[in-house]
């Protein structure tokens, strides 16, 4: 810490601990020790594998600096919950490292309230972190549990697997295009897209239910084709996708076709799951989707060959592949 004089140091230190105590200390009943010591102490359930993931959100890069703190708090946790979901892990604990330009208590209170609201939905406990002064940045680490051998890894896809995805992609990217003035959305379509961008719904329950059904999974944070590409790369298989089979939100159908295709295939910030499973699991997967009320769509097939996705029109003509780009939709 740099400070002009000793008094500055004292004031800053005091407010740092006040912030932690007042806003970031809540009961953590399943932790042996939560916030307040040098480390948290955690006891995993006997025999369970721990799944650990960290995501960082930087003002100006991952969110607008004037973003509503009440939405930013849950979003910082949601993007991490999405990683646990993609691994088929059940959320348990989290840590939060936060750099704040100033001790704006109204901001911090709204951020913390939103964070704990989402954490509470998944019985997740905040057990530690770090609080410092600096350009606004938020880093959350999540710890989950998964039964041994059942984590949904990226490298498990086999040729012949169905490729599935939850929900729809593209609306968050469309909202971003709207906020950046590249497109003008209105009414309920605009609201739906902004909601997707600011309040993503991580597919935690779905991830858990896919244990033992899916052979591989990933969450879509960087765009459908990019993230599916990671599964293909890790698994050493290709993918055949049919453009007409990709699920489309209403907003995507309304948008300019080139922008819509770009958002749908390469938008990012969707936090849906893409997963592969053998065709023998179709009925079970469909009933999971029904139970959870989460639309699940079969979008293609994993095939032997180089690890890339080929996208075809209904007549089988190749309309796009990651290497060719997406301009064929213009
Ligand atoms: P240390 O100097 O040992 O790193 P700190 O003073 O940074 O300890 O933090 C004191 C306690 O508060 C630790 O238990 C730490 O995990 C916790 N903590 C700090 N910041 C946060 C935060 N933003 N959210 C939750 N816990 C926090
Ligand atoms: Mg510290």
Image (spheres, grey):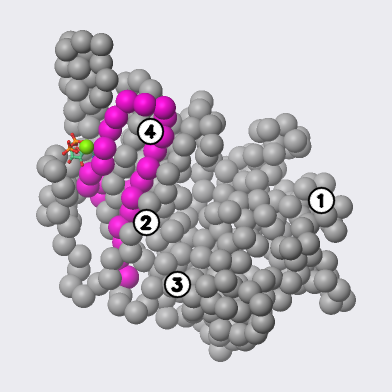
Task: Write down the region rendered in magenta.
Answer: 118-146
Mark 4 to mark 2: distance in Å?
A: 21 Å
Residue 132 % position (x, y): 29, 29
- Residue 37 visible to an observer of this rendering: yes
Pointer 3: residues within 10 angstroms few (<14), some, or many (20+)? many
Ligand 1: give its quadrant: top left
Q: Are marks 2 and 3 in contact (CB under 8 Å)?
A: no
Lower position in the chain sequence, tag 1 or tag 4: 4
| Residue receiving disc 1 | 258
- Is disc 1 placed on a helix, strand or loop? helix
Q: Compare marks 3 and 1 and give the one earlier in the sequence.
A: 3
Q: Earlier in the sequence, mark 2 or mark 1?
A: 2
Indicate yes or no whether the magenta region holds residue 169: no
Residue picked out by circle 2: 53
| 233, 14: nearer the viewer | 233
Residue at which label 4 appears: 111
Where residue 317 appears, as percent x and y from the top left, is 86, 74
Horizontally, residue 169 falls left or right of residue 12, namely right
Q: Nearer the viewer, mark 4 or mark 3?
A: 3
Structural crowding at the residue carrying mark 1, measured as other residues with C-alpha within 10 Å and reported as few (<14), some (14–19) or many (≥20): some
For the point 32% across and 21% down, the residue is 103
Mark closer to the chain start, 4 or 3: 4
Where on the picture, by quarter, is residue 109?
top left
- On screen, 303 above or below 220? below
* Mark 2 or mark 3: whose residue is earlier in sequence: 2
Label 2 – label 1 distance at C-alpha: 34 Å
């Amino acid at each position: 810490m740099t400070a002009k004089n000793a008094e500055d140091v004292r004031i800053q230190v005091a407010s740092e601990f006040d912030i932690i105590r007042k806003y970031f200390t809540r009961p953590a009943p399943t932790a042996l020790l939560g916030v307040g010591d040098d480390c948290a102490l955690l006891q995993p359930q006997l025999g369970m594998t721990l799944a650990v993931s960290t995501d960082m959100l930087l003002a100006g890069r991952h969110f607008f600096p004037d973003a509503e703190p009440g939405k930013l708090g849950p979003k910082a946790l949601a993007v991490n919950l999405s990683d646990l979901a993609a691994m088929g892990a059940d959320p348990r604990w989290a840590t939060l490292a936060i750099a704040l330009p100033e001790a704006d208590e109204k901001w911090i209170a709204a951020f913390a309230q939103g964070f704990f609201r989402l954490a509470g939905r998944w019985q997740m406990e905040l057990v530690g972190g770090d609080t410092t002064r600096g350009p606004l940045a938020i880093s959350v680490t999540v710890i989950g549990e998964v039964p041994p051998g059942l984590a949904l890894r990226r490298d498990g896809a086999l040729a012949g697997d169905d490729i599935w995805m939850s929900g729809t992609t593209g609306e968050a990217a469309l909202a971003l295009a709207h906020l950046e003035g590249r497109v003008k959305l209105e009414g309920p379509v605009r609201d739906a897209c902004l909601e997707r961008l600011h309040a993503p719904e991580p597919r935690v329950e779905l991830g858990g239910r896919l244990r033992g059904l899916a052979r591989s999974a990933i969450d879509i944070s960087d765009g459908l084709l990019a993230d599916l590409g990671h599964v293909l790369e890790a698994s050493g298989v290709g993918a055949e996708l049919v453009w007409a089979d990709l699920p489309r939100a209403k907003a995507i159908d309304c948008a300019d076709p080139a922008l819509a295709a770009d958002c749908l295939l390469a938008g990012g910030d969707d936090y849906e799951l893409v997963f592969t499973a053998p065709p023998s699991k179709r009925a079970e997967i469909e009933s999971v989707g029904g139970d959870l009320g989460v639309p699940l769509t079969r979008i293609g097939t994993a095939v032997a060959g180089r690890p890339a996705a080929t996208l075809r029109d209904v007549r089988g003509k190749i309309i796009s592949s990651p290497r060719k780009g997406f301009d064929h939709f213009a």
